[in-house]
Amino acid sequence: MILTRRAFGLGAAAATLTAAAPMAAKARAAPAMLDTIILGAGISGLNAALLLEEQGQRVMVLEARDRAGGRIHTLTNQPGYPEMGFNSMGSGYGRGIDAARRAGVELIDLSPRLRAMPPSALFVGGQHVPRDQWAASPLNPFPETLRAMMPGEITSRLVAQHNPLADWTQWTAPDAAPLDISVQDFLKGQGLSDAAIRFAYDSAPAYGSTAWDVSALMLEFIDGFIKGQIAAGPQTFAVKGGNANLIHGLRALLKGDLRLGQRVVAVDSGAGGASVQCADGSVHRAARVVCALPLATLRRIWFTPGLSGAQAAAVATIPYQPLTNIFLTVQRPFWQDDGISPAMWTNSEMGTMFPQYFGASDGDVTGLLVQGRGELAQRWDRMGADAAMALVVETLATLRPASRGAVSAAHYHSWGREEFSTGAWAYFRPGQISGLHSAMIAPAGRVHFAGEHCATGARGVEGALESSERAALEVLTA
């Protein structure tokens, strides 16, 4: 079935994306020729621009949003400056730490606070189950040898214990293709029933909406990357005053233009250079283009010549993570009243809750970040922000009566509903890594590709920066 679906996707994507729209007749004439145009002002696009400027290139950055940063997004108007996207980096984030140095921002080590945090409380079927009672609980659906594992931890622990990927850096190599199966099949192989997988994975999936939807090979690569981070050191860093300050610092280093509110609609890559047209009719020309946009955004851009084959299939079919954040402000520390951790894993309509420890001292909770992932995020989004926030506050009060009147919903951010993201991060379905990844990142004419989804040796900000280095090198050696 995987091969059949893949073959169909290749044909359909090629037919869709190889048709190219003409540039608008009223486009502005004779724009100045630049060396490189960067599409997207996330950290990958900004870093690519800076690297190229260091080599003497004339660069312009175009961003559709009214802000730079992409999935680095800090709520500077909320207590503790909570992060809606990227939140921290490990000791092994060499590129990220260097970017912070270049940007002139201060990194703070969160690890002492994180280590002092109490573990997540467990609420299953509307009931609080103390962690030391979970193994014997009648609500526990796991086989005897796994009953001591917490639901939110079981997938990552099983992958870590039984990772069949001998060298995680070779996850895209042809030899790894047999491992490109679903997480569902992987967990079944570890003895979990369908019901246990639905409960443990699908309630709050880190990737996808269900275990059927995600490649186990991707999780095995991520496990290897995480183990490398752990080996590099115990620190966990964030930018003082919010991670958006990293973007502000990098942006200040740019010599060329960064233009916000510029939605790209067409890219024409010809023998004499590349032309980029924006929705307002403006046209910009350069020898090369670095596209650091999410694949879901690329689907709305006309390429001439059109993308084709596996590259077109990747753009058309690789999905993005449904993720919605609700930030709660706290008027009273209700967890001190009921004696239960402020962190929560639930299989309820309120999802998972993470206390934010960004106060003056280690124990200060500056707010609560509630996350809906996968199907829950989609349900919240269908309800609308106000109804979803009210549901979360009421569900929390039902599960923990001490919280009634102690919290207020302050902010709703849906990555799935954001026009220029349509999801928090890209993930691979079973069979997509071996079939699409290498083709996805290959240059297409004068266009080069960057972004976390294009990384091969890292995840998160580190992966985004890695991909920007490759794209910049491709431009300089073309």
Image (cartoon, rainbow, N blue to C red):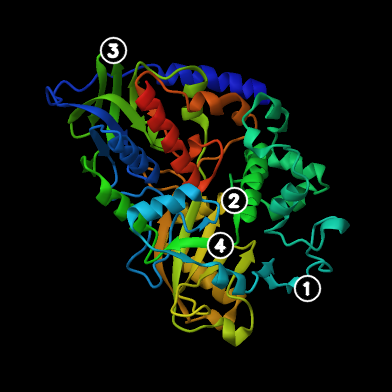
Which of 433/182 is in front?
433
Label 2 vs 4, first from the N-terminus = 2
Residue identified by numbered label 3: 271
Sequence-first tag of 3 and 2: 2
Q: Position of residue 238 (x, y in %)?
A: 45, 61
The kind of residue tagged 1 is: Asp
Instruction: Tell which circle, 3 or 1, labels the residue nearer the N-terminal end.
Output: 1
Q: Which of the 4 image quarters holds residue 122?
A: bottom right
**Mark in front: 1 vs 4:** 4
In the rendered image of this protein, does residue 468 appear above or below residue 253? above
Question: Which is nearer the N-term, disc 1 or disc 4?
Answer: 1
Q: Is residue 203 visible?
A: no
Relative image position of residue 440 (x, y in whole percent): 49, 27
What's the amino acid at mark 3? Ala
Horizontal and vertical percent for residue 158?
75, 50
Quick check: can you spot residue 266? yes
Q: CA distance from mark 1 to mark 4?
A: 29 Å
**CA distance separating discs 3 and 4:** 49 Å
Q: Residues within 10 Å of mark 4 (few under 14, many from 20)?
A: some
- The image shows residue 73, relative to residue 307, as above or below, that is below
Q: Is residue 476 above or below residue 137?
A: above
Q: Residue at x 61, y 24 (%)?
A: 5
User: Which numbered circle lies on residue 235?
Assistant: 4
> What crowding class fits label 2: few (fewer than 14 Cα within 10 Å), some (14-19), or many (20 or more)?
many
Secondary element type, mark 3? loop
What residue sits 45% from the left and 50% below the top?
96
